[in-house]
Image (tube, coloured by chain):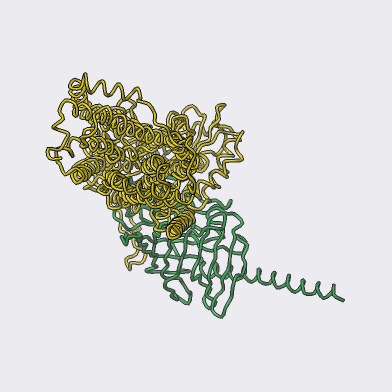
Chain colours: A yellow, B green
Amino acid sequence: MGYKVNRDAVIITVCALISVLSLVGVGRLKIDSSTDVFIPAKAPVVETNRRIEATFGSLDALVVSLEDEKGILTTEHLALLGELTDRIAQLEGVKQASSLSNLKHLESALDGVNVVPLTMGSITELEARIASWPSFYEGIFLSKDRRSVSILIQTQTDYNASQLLTSLKQLLAPLEGTVDTSILGLPVVNEQIKISLLSDMITLGPVVAVLIMLVLYLFLRSIKATLLCLVPLLFSSSLTLGIMSWTGITFTMATMLVPILLLIVGSAYTIHIFSHFFEEYEEVGVTAALTKVVRKNTYPILSAAATTAFGFLAQITSPLLPFRTFGLLSFIGVVVCAFSSLILLPALIRLVYQKRPSRSRVRKKVGRGVWLRIETSLSNHYGKATLFISLALAAIILPLSYNNLEKGTNILAFFSKSSDLVQDTESYNQRMQGSSSLSVMLKPSDSALHPQTLSTIERAIQELEKEPLVGSVQSILPFVKRMNQLLGPGDELPISPAREDEPVFDFFSDVPPDTTSVEPYESQATQAGGQGRYEIPLDPERYGLEDENQLSSLIAQYLLLYSASLDAFIDDPLEPEHLLITILLKGSDTRTLRHLSDLIPTLFPSSWTVEIGGGEAVSLALTDLVTKSQLISLFSSLIAVWLLVLLTFRSAKLATISMIPCLFALAAVFAAMAIFSIKLDIITSLLAALCIGVGIDYAIHLIAAFQRDDQDLVTIMQTTGKAILANAASVALGFSGLLFSRFIPIANMGLLFSIAMISASLSALLILGAIKVHYSSLITRRNP
Amino acid sequence: MKRPFITLILLILAASLVWADLSAGHVMTKVMETQSSSSSALDLMLTLIDPNGQIRERRIQTLSQTKDGLTSSLTIFLSPENVRNTRFLSLEKEDGKSEMWIYLPALKRSRRIGSSEEGGSFMGSDFSYADMASTTYDEKQAAHQMLEEDATRYIIQSIPYEKETYGKTVTVVDKATFLPLRVQFYDRDGTTLLKTLVTDQTDVVDGKPIAKALTMTTESSGHATRLVMMQTRFDVPLNSAYFTLKFLETGRL
C-alpha cells in the first residue's frame, strides 16, 4: 500500500510538474495567424510572390478609408486627409502613403504641361482636375458619391504588421466622431485572425471543458469524479501546448484545435475508467477495483485510442505543414491521454477515494432508452429494408454531396457577416473598386514599352474588366495615355515636319558643336499641352514617326517625366523588362479566382511569361492544396484504421464491415456541408479523416460485443449500444462547444463533427444491428 | 560666490555651443563652396544596381552656368537608346523659381513643364532630382550641428528649414578637401534613415577636389545607384546658346 501511495505521489507530481512546465512556456508560443503559414515554402505561388516582391516591392497593401455621409470633399476633411497621409507616410514599415492630398496632377497649360498638387486651390478646382482624369482617381482614391476617400499604403517588404496596425489605429482613434474610419487589407484580416485565435484559445477551452464536465457529471453523478476525470485531459492538453511552445511549433488555426480536441476525445477514456470503477469498487474496494478496471480496460482504451490517434496521424500525409503538425501533436496527445487515463487517473482515484462511498453515490443503472427500443425494433422487424435503404442512401449521398462541395479558403469568410471587418470590406467594395487583388507580372517577348505590347495588355484589361467581380485593373497604361494626351500631337495640329537628323551631342568630344542648320528655326514650344489623344500611340504615321520602335522610344520619353510614380507598374521607367498589372476585386470567391486564373494566361501570347501572385492567388493555391490534403488524409486514415481494425479482429471482412458507420459519418458530413453551404476550407478539410478515427470506435465496440456469443442483440444494445450512444452524445456535446468560436470554419467544424458522431453511432447501431440480425454470419467469426 | 561661478560656467558652455554651431554651419558652407562653380560640364554614368545584382546604365551630360546669381542648366540624355537626345532645360528666374522645358526627340517637340517633382527619382535611379542638384545644405538652408570631430573629419547634422524632401541629414566631411564622404538622409520626421550616399572615389581637377564616384543606396529596398563622373570641366566658358529653346529643340547652337 505504502509503495503504491509513493508511486502514485510520484506519478501525480511528475505529471503536475510537466503540466506546469508546459503552461509556463505558453507565453513563448509563436502565433502565425496568416494563411500563408499553411502554404509550403516551395509552392509555386510562394515563389511567384517572392519574384514579384523582389521586382515590385511588398504585395501587402493597406487601405485607410475615411467616410462622411455628408460628403468628404470639404476643406476640413482634405486638411485632415493631408495630415493623416503625412503621418502615415512617416510610420515605420510604410514605404509610401498616397491619397488625394499628396498626388501630383498633370494638366495642360497654354505653353505646355503643369505638374501641380492635386488639391491645390479650391474644391471646385479639385473637382475639375478629378473630372479630367476620373478613371485614375475615382474608385481608387475617392468614391464616386464623394462620401469617402482612401489612403493607399504600400508597406516595406519586411515590416511588422501588428506594430503598423497599432500605430494606424492610434492615429485614427482621435478622429472618432469626425469621420468614419476603417482599415482594410490582408494584414488587417491576418491581425484579426490573430486576435480571434487568442480569444478562442481563452474562451473555447473553458467552454468545452464545462461541456465535458457536464457530460462527465451526467454519467458519473459525482463532482469529485468529474473533476478527477478532467485531470488527464488537462494534462495531455497542456502537454501539447508545452510541446508547441518549447519546440517552437507555430500556433496556427489548426494546431490551436489540438488541446480542445483532446479534451473532447479523451473524455471517453476517463469515463470508461470511472464508470467501471464505480461498478466494481463497492464490492472489492478501491485498490482491487482499480487493478481490475485497469486490467480490463487497457486493451479497449488503447485500441480505441489507437484508431483515433491514427485517424489524426493520417494528417501527416498532408502537403500542408500545419496539418502535419496538427496530426502529429494530436497523435501524441491522444496517446498521452489514453496512457494518463490508465496511469494518472487511477493514481488520483487511489489518492482521493480512501473510503468506500455511500451507495447513493453509485450510479444507478438506467432503464432501456427509447432510442434503443426503436433501434432494436428496426433491426429486428425492418432490418433488411433499413439496411438496403440506408446503404443505398449513403451510396448516393456520399459521392453526390462530395462532388458538390464548395471549396474555398477566402479568409474573410472566416468571420461572421455581421463582424466589423466584413461590414467594412463590403461597404468599401460597394463604394470603391475592390479591396482584394490579384497581381499579374508580365514579361513580354518584345520590349515592354513597345506599342503592340501595351496594346495587348489593353485588350487583356478590357476582357478582365468585363468580369463581374473585377472592379478595375491598374497598370502603366493610364500614365502612357495621359502623357500622350498632354504631350502628344493634337488632331488639328499639323504633324511636325521631319527635321534633319540631329547631330550627335558630346560636349567633351574634340569635334566643335554643330552650329549650322539647313532649316530655319521655328520654335515648337509654344504649342499648348493637352492636345493629344488619350490613347496608346499605335500609328507611327500619326506621330510623324517611321516605325513602332520609334513609338516605343516616344513612350519611354513620356515616362521619363513620370519616373517617380511608376515603380508599382514597371520595373524600370526607361527599359522595363517586367510589367505588373493589379486586378482589384470586389469579391474573391474561389470560383471567380479560378476562372480569372484560367482566363489570364489565355489573354497574352504564349511567348510571354505570365505569373499570377498576390494574397488571393495564395488563397486559391491553398484551396487546391486543402482539397488535395483532404483526399490524401481521408484515404490514409481509411487505410490506417482498416489495418488497425484488421489487427484487432484479425478478419478483413470484419474490418471492412466496421468501416460502414464511418461512411455514414462522411456522407452526413458532406451532405450537411452541402445543405448549410459550408465550404471545404483549412479547418473543415481536417474533418473527414478525424471522423473516421473517432467514428470507427463505435463499430469496433459493437462488433466486439457481437463476437461474444453469450449476449443477444437486446442485451448488447442495452449495454454496449447505450455506451456508444452516451459516448457519441458526449463527444457531440463537446464539439458543440466549438460553435462558440469567433471563426466560422471552427464553428462549422463543431457542428459537422457533432453530426458525424451522431451519424456514426446511429448507423453503427442500426446497420450493424441489422446485419447481426439478418446476416449474422457476416459479422461473427467463423472460428470463435 | 557660487552664483557668479555658475554663471561663468554657463556662459562658457553657451559660447562653446554657439561656436560649435557656427563652426558646423561654416563647414557646410565650405562644403557647398567647394562643390560650386560658375560653370560646369559633367559627363556622368549612372549605374543602377538591383538588390539581386542586375545592373542598368544611363549616361547623361549636364552643362550649367551661373550668371548674375541665376543658374541655367541643360541635361542631355545619351543612353539608353530610347531616350537618347531627350533634353531638359532649366532656367532660374529672378523670383527664385525655375522655368523648365523638356524636349522629346521622338516627337521633335519641346514642352514647358510647370514644376518638377524634386523628390522624384531621377531616371529611375536612387538619386532624386533634388539630390542631383545638391546633397548638402548651406548655412542659410539648414540648422547645422557638429556631432563629432576628429583629426580628419567632421560629422555634422543638418536640419533643413524647409523640409521638402528630407527632415535631417548627417554628413561626414573630409577636413582636408571639404568633400562630403558620406551623407545619410532621414525622413521628414528625422527618425528613419532613407538613403545613404557614400563617396567611393575622389579626384582633383584643375586644383578643385571632386567626388568622382558616389553610391547612393536606398535603405528600404537595397537598391543602389553608382554615379561616376567620367569627364568634368569646371569654370570653363560655356556658350549661352546652349541654354536656349533653339538648342533644346534642335541640338544646334
Work out whether residue A349 or residue A587 is closer to the camera in this orientation and state it: A349
Which quadrant, please, contains the C terminus of chain A? top left
Residue A507 coordinates in the image, percent (x, y): 37, 64
| Nearer to me, B64 or B194 | B194
Above or below, comparing residue A328 to residue A727 in the picture: below
Q: Is residue A90 visible?
A: yes
Q: Residue furthest bottom?
A: B151
**Which quadrant would residue A596 be assigned to in this image?**
top left
B96, above or below A773, in the image: below
Q: Residue furthest front?
A: A283
Q: Is residue A136 visible?
A: no
Q: Position of residue A135 (x, y in %)?
A: 40, 33
Residue at 33 percent across and 47 percent down: it is A38
Which residue is most to the right?
B1
Relative to A502, is A76 on the left or the right? right
Residue beneath the point at 45% across and 45% down: B112
Residue drawn at the location 30% of the way across and 58% of the way down? A504
x and y percentages locating residue B104 in the rendered image = 36, 48
